[in-house]
Each structure stands twice: as structure tokens, then as C-alpha cells.
Image (tube, rainbow, N blue to C red):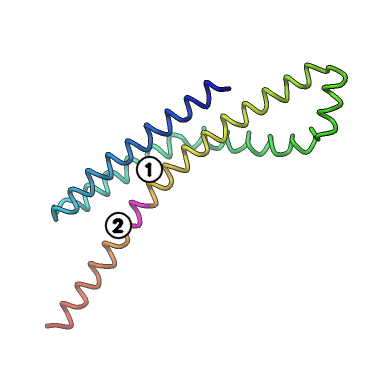
Amino acid sequence: MGQRIDQFCEDLRVKLSNIDSRFGSLKAKIDSKNQQAEQAVRGHLGEVQTRIEQERNKVSAAQLKVKNWVEGRKIATTEKIAEWKAKRETTKLRNRADDAEEYAAATIDVALAAVDDAEEAALEAWLARLDADSAEAKSESVLAS
């Protein structure tokens, strides 16, 4: 399990680093008042949405595993686990450990997907603000005329 946690940490670090780098590039374009900034943001948003869509089945399966784990925890009460230990029912204990590891891996997949969702939301928010500011500027321009 320690290897899975190490891999999760590395995957999360890489994903966040990539997002930071891409946002830094987008911010530089925006700050330089590049007229193509909106196009760049829209293009990046498209890439993020494609990535999210490609991972949709994996995330759905992970969410189902999380739900199944929660349901399974209701069955494997503290008393039942103590009983399995006392009776040395290693098969049940190993199955529980395997299920816990699958749960952990599934929550990792869900967490990484949430990072993609947050990136998508940030890009959509920027575009929405651009639309609002643009409409306001046009409105003010019409009023000034």
C-alpha cells in the first residue's frame, strides 16, 4: 500500500505542477493583453474537457468502488473484525485489507479527477468573467455615444 501512496503523491504532484505550468502560460498571455488570450483559454479548456471525458469511465468505476467500500464497512463492524482476529479467519481479514486498498486506490482516482474538474471550473469562470466584462464595456460604450 505504501507504494500506492507514493505513486498517488507523485501523480498528484505532476498533475498540479502541469496545471500550474499551463496556468502560468495562460496568465502570461492574458497579462500581455494578447488578443488571442481568449482563444488560448478556450483551447486549453477543450483539452481539459477531453481529458475529463476520457477518464469518465475510470472515475465512475472508482466512485462505485468507494460506494461499495462504504457499504462494506457497515458489515465489517469493529466487533466482527475482532471476532475474525480472535478466530484467525485470515481469509476474511485479507479480503478486508484488499478491499481497503482498492478503496484507497479508488479515492485517489476520484481525487485526481476532482483536480481536473477544478481546473475546468477555473477556466470556465475566467471565460464567464470575460463575457461579463465585455458585455459591460459594450453597454458603457453605447451609453457614452
**Front-most of residues 42 and 72:** 72
Q: CA distance from mark 2 to mark 1?
A: 14 Å
Q: Is residue 37 above or below residue 109?
A: below
Residue at position x 56%, y 36% in the image? 107
Residue 114: % across, % down? 47, 43
Q: Nearer the viewer, residue 48 or 81?
A: 81
Q: Pointer 2 and pointer 1: residues touching (CB < 8 Å)? A: no
Q: Which mark is residue 49?
A: 1
On residue 139, the disc is: none
Where is residue 93 shown, x and y percent of the image? Answer: 76, 21
Q: Is residue 124 magenta?
A: yes
Kind of residue at disc 1:
Gln
The secondary structure type at the circle numbered 2 is helix
Residue 67 in which image quadrant: top right
Number of numbered discs visible in the structure rendering: 2
Dot 2 or dot 1: first in sequence order is 1
Q: Amino acid at mark 2?
A: Leu
Q: Is residue 54 magenta?
A: no
| For residue 72, above or below residue 128 | above
* Element assignment for label 1: helix
Image quadrant containing the N terminus: top right
Quadrant of the frame with the C terminus: bottom left
Q: Main secondary structure of the magenta part?
A: helix
**Which residue is depicted at the point 17% across and 54% down?**
31
The percent coordinates of residue 53 (x first, y second) are 43, 39
Q: Residues within 10 Å of mark 1 (few under 14, many from 20)?
A: some
Task: From the viewer's perspective, tell me whether residue 114 is left or right of residue 144.
Answer: right
Q: Which residues are magenta?
A: 122-126
Q: Which residue position holds label 2?
A: 127
